[in-house]
Image (cartoon, coloured by chain):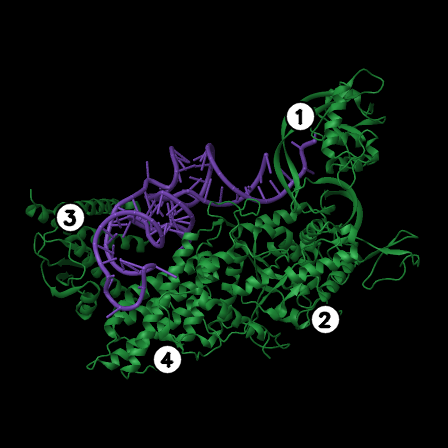
RNA sequence: GGGCGGUUAGCUCAGCUGGUUAGAGCGCCUGCCUUACAAGCAGGAGGUCGCAGGUUCGAGCCCUGCACUGCCCACCA
């Protein structure tokens, strides 16, 4: 049953190995594999049968991108990290589910479609609610899948069969169920409160959706005449226009300046009202004039004061932030800022305006449209996050949502990485206010509440009611508000797995996948989404019993066990990417330019924890070169496989896939590369486990390029001999190790660079790999210290080769010339077994082993050996002297430091033995080298020109 | 007003529980078209680890203060 046969591409139409082009061209292979992964449905996960044995599934919920969005660098970064972990776990043999979907994004989507309507000369009001909502659905159908197709392109291994949309029928049913249950449990209420109101979006928004910005403003003083006196009471305000809705002036009870005015009435200027002077502790005497005008309908603090003192609230603005009739005929209809101007002018004219001081204040703006938010008195729906549910008698001591959500992190049921975010989360959860969940929008989950026209009561039900539940009247109308987008996305960890189950039961998916294993997300939605998921997830999953029927504990009710907070991606100048700044880097463009693998590797390598990352294209260029390097290593290998075939040396493919080994009597290079592979693999596994993508990337880079290509491949050229007199056994053995190590290395790299490794892996198996995809093969586990002797001996060999190369440079030996060398090795060190390696890699014609080095020659030394290049051309004495002098100074400094420490009895007493022993060895080595260097310098001087 | 990060080579960044003489990539300099790769190979230069104190046998790493810088939270009109 092949799906999407329309764009099916046969991956096995890949070029034959020997025809690999010279330069790696990602464009030539990536789309092919991207389509293959999707079409072959390789990453779909069937729900395990109930009671199935085996390890727990590794489950990750993708933070659902907004339908309005396009893939940006932040997504790509997040997806790269997640995909790496998901691929890694899958390759470790775990049942691995990465679940994708999209979010309907209430405000954002409605705004976008409304803007579209405006360009068409119409509006949502003209269309009407039903037609508008239908229009949004249409929009979503056409444009809502942009991010998902980008995800397919960049190789995200999600389970597409489980893709959801937050307004899907079954999810909407679940959202309604959740709302009704919370309402029944007394945790959802409706009431008139001051909320953040966006006059442009014309909806309430939550505290989190308000972004504060510092702004230079003014603090105006206004004189309010005291009734029956010549006196004035001067208040200070940043928002003079709201004075039209003042109902009192408050002073601190201890402020002696105003004691005589307590309880007096004031004439409210520009109106015909009189308002009282009241006292309230909240007022700070040292701010402004110490007297605060109280406007309960337009300021959250004033609202609280009004509540405490039983004052009325007078709204003087409408939902568009224009003054209304309550503001009086002179102001009605004016925009809030025009009204401010006029109020100030009128006060001035009456001589009631006092000083105006510069004042910096934080001004709230709508997160979406940047309009200045207006605190507004309105009736909204709230979730009581700090209240305990009333109908949970079956669960005594059940905590409030915030309480449980806080405890889940405190007691380690949820682990947040990096750890410092735990504290931020807990602090936030400790000071959380009730959550305003109603939005005056049309696009979203409509609140399942009906208002009765008769008794005015509210009916909240699972099924649309026909009559009022309280008085039976049929004069009922549904609430027009919809739910905050985060209400439905906060439920996702349970709803995507089939919640709600029948009473007292669970669902197969909840049994198999809940709690999910990991959430990878950015700090920016820690409160918006992560915190809400924890609150709602803990609350609702508690109702579903464990697979064995026992009740769920808090530990088992959390939506995820781990949260990994990744860094934020900025542009190369550390600026936050934003459309308005025009510095948004489109990842798809970069991907097309350098290849997905190079971009993924860049992001992985820059993903060190703690700091934001500045995306740097120059690095991507470097990693494209890395991909090319591997590509060419593969070409080299395939070429030699062909040669071997022609020479009658056949290496069976069955040797592939096994963990490489090298016998104790195998050549040093074989033992070494196997040992390196083992330790690097072990380190990479550890790095992934710690979310150290950067370490993993640098380890695999260093191994592939530094060890495998620069050293091993060069040496293997010696071992691969296809001539008539060739040692066929030796060649076959070398080829076997080469292929095995390369195959393992591809698997090692594949989570970070899935496309390149997939292509080469298939080619390596000549189109008949043991699994459909490298992503379904097993990850190399490696082992530390698998052959320390080989690693140590090889690095000595490397040192010798590097020394000779350096000497050649110093002596000005022609690049192509082969030269003889003299080596004096200390006891126990021998290069005899590896002469041909030295000859090849350092272009040496002959190696003479000597007991003493001649005087006056340019020599390089290490504690283990001295080496001289025999060449008639004189060394550049001045340059050599300079080099040696520098070297000598360095050694002297090092020796002095070592001696100082070793001469310090406190050090010998307190430092651990291994440190002391290590330093002793270093001291001895340094002393030896120092002597050698000093002698070399002396010899040089003796023969020098002066 | 609270809280949290950052400051290491010209640039971008590593440096894991404090342990010799601090690393990588890019860039730079020198020499190489060595038939896997010039998107390459080989060799090299380059750092008083933001500043000032302190703890320690020993500090890039721990403590205190300062400077610069970025972010988050916050109901002082």
- Do the dots labelled 2 and 3 sit on one chain? yes
For label 2, the residue is A505
> According to the image, label 4 marks what residue?
A655
Q: Chain of mark 1?
A: A
The subunit letter for the residue under badge 2 reads: A
- Specify the subunit that label 3 lies on: A
Q: Earlier in the sequence, mark 4 or mark 2?
A: 2
Outermost bottom residue = A648
Assess whether mark 2 and mark 4 are in contact (beta carbons under 8 angstroms). Answer: no
3D distance between C-alphas at marks 3 and 1? 75 Å
User: What's the mark number on residue A587?
Assistant: none
Give whichever of discs 2 and 1 has the lower sequence position.
Answer: 1
Distance from Cα at disc 2 to Cα at disc 3: 82 Å
* Marks 4 and 2, how far apart at CA: 50 Å
Q: CA distance from mark 4 to mark 3?
A: 51 Å
In front of the other: A802 or A272: A272
Q: Determine whether A183 is above or below A734 in the image.
A: above
Q: Quadrant of residue A330?
A: top right
Dot 4: few (<14), some (14–19), or many (≥20) neighbours within 10 Å? few
User: Would you place residue A174 above or below residue A211 in this image?
Assistant: below
Circle 1: element type: loop
Q: Nearer the viewer, mark 1 or mark 4?
A: 4
Q: Nearer the viewer, residue A509 or A45?
A: A45
């Amino acid at each position: 049953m092949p799906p999407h046969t329309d764009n099916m591409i046969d991956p096995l139409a890949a070029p034959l190995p020997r025809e690999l082009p010279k330069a790696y061209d990602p464009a030539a292979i990536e789309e092919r594999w991207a389509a293959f992964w999707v079409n072959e449905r390789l990453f779909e996960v069937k729900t395990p049968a109930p009671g199935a044995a085996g390890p727990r599934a590794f489950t990750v919920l993708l933070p659902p991108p907004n339908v309005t969005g396009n893939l940006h660098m932040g997504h790509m970064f997040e997806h790269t990290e997640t995909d790496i972990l998901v691929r890694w776990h899958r390759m470790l043999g775990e049942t691995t589910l990465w679940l994708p979907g999209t979010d309907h994004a209430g405000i954002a989507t409605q705004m976008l479609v409304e803007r579209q309507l405006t360009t068409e000369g119409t509006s949502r009001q003209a269309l009407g609610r039903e037609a508008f909502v239908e229009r949004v659905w249409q929009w979503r159908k056409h444009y809502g899948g942009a991010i998902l197709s980008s995800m397919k392109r960049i190789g995200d291994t999600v389970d597409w069969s489980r893709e959801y949309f937050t307004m899907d029928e079954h999810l909407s049913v679940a959202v309604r169920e959740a709302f009704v249950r919370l309402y029944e449990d007394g945790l959802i209420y409706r009431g008139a409160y001051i909320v953040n109101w966006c006059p442009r979006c014309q909806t309430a928004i939550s505290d989190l959706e308000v972004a504060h910005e510092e702004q230079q403003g003014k603090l105006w003083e206004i004189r309010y005449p005291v009734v029956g006196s010549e006196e004035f009471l001067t208040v200070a305000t940043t928002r003079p226009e709201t004075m039209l809705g003042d109902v009192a002036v408050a002073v601190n009870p201890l402020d002696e300046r105003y004691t005589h005015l307590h309880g007096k009435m004031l004439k409210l200027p520009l109106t015909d009202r009189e308002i009282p002077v009241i006292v309230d502790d909240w007022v700070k005497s040292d701010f402004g004039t110490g007297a605060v005008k109280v406007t309960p309908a337009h300021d959250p603090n004033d609202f609280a004061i009004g509540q405490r003192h039983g004052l009325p609230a007078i709204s003087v603005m409408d939902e568009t932030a224009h003054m209304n009739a309550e503001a009086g005929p002179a102001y009605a209809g004016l925009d809030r800022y025009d009204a401010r101007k006029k109020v100030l002018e009128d006060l001035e004219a009456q001589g009631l305006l006092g000083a105006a001081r510069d004042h910096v204040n934080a001004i709230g703006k709508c997160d979406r449209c940047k309009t200045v938010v207006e605190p507004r008195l309105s009736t909204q729906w709230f979730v009581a996050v700090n209240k305990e549910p009333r109908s949970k008698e079956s669960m005594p001591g059940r905590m409030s949502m915030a309480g449980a959500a806080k405890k889940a992190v405190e007691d380690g049921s949820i682990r947040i990485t990096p750890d410092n975010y735990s504290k931020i989360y807990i602090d936030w959860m400790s000071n959380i206010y009730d959550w305003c969940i109603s939005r005056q929008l049309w696009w979203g989950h409509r609140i399942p509440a009906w208002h009765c026209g008769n008794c005015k009561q509210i009916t909240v039900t699972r099924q649309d009611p026909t009559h009022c539940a309280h008085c039976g009247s049929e004069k009922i109308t549904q609430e027009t508000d919809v739910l905050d987008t985060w209400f439905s996305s906060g439920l996702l960890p349970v709803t995507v797995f089939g919640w709600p189950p029948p009473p007292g039961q669970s669902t197969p998916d909840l049994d198999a996948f809940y709690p999910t294993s990991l959430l990878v997300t950015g700090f920016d939605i820690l409160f918006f989404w992560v915190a809400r998921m924890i609150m709602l997830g803990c609350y609702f999953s508690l109702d579903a019993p464990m697979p064995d029927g026992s009740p769920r504990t808090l530990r088992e009710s959390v939506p995820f066990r781990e949260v990994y907070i990744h860094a934020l991606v900025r542009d190369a100048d550390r600026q936050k990417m934003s459309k308005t700044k025009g510095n948004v880097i489109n990842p798809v463009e970069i991907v097309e330019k350098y290849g997905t693998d190079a971009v993924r590797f860049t992001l992985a390598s820059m993903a060190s924890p703690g700091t934001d990352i500045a995306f740097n294209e120059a690095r991507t260029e470097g990693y494209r070169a890395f991909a090319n390097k591997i590509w060419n290593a593969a070409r080299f290998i395939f070429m030699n496989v062909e040669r071997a075939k022609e020479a009658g040396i056949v290496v069976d493919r069955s040797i592939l896939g096994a963990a490489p080994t090298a016998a104790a009597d195998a050549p040093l290079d074989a033992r070494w590369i196997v040992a390196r592979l083992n330790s690097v693999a072990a380190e990479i596994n550890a790095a992934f486990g710690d979310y150290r993508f950067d370490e993993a990337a640098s380890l695999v880079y260093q191994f592939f390029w530094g060890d495998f290509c620069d050293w091993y491949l060069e040496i293997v050229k010696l071992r691969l001999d296809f001539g008539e007199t060739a040692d066929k056994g030796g060649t076959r053995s070398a080829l076997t190790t080469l292929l095995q190590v390369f195959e393992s290395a591809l698997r090692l790299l594949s989570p970070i660079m899935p496309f390149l490794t997939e292509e080469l892996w298939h080619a390596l198996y000549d189109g008949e790999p043991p699994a459909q995809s490298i992503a379904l093969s097993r990850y190399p586990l490696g082992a530390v210290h698998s052959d320390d002797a080989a690693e140590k001996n090889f690095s000595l060999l490397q040192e010798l080769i590097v020394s000779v190369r350096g000497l050649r440079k110093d002596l000005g030996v022609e690049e192509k010339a082969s030269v003889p060398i003299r080596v004096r090795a200390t006891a126990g060190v021998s290069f005899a077994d590896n002469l041909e390696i030295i000859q090849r890699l350092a272009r040496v014609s002959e190696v003479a082993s000597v007991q003493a080095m001649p005087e006056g020659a340019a020599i390089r030394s290490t504690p283990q050996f001295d080496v001289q290049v025999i060449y008639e051309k004189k060394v550049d004495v001045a340059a050599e002297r300079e080099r040696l002098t520098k070297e000598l100074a360095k050694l002297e400094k090092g020796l002095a430091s070592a001696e100082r420490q070793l001469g310090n009895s406190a050090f010998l007493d307190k430092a651990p033995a291994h440190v002391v022993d290590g330093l002793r060895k270093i001291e001895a080595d340094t002393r030896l080298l120092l002597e050698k260097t000093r002698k070399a310098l002396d010899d040089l001087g003796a023969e020098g020109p002066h």
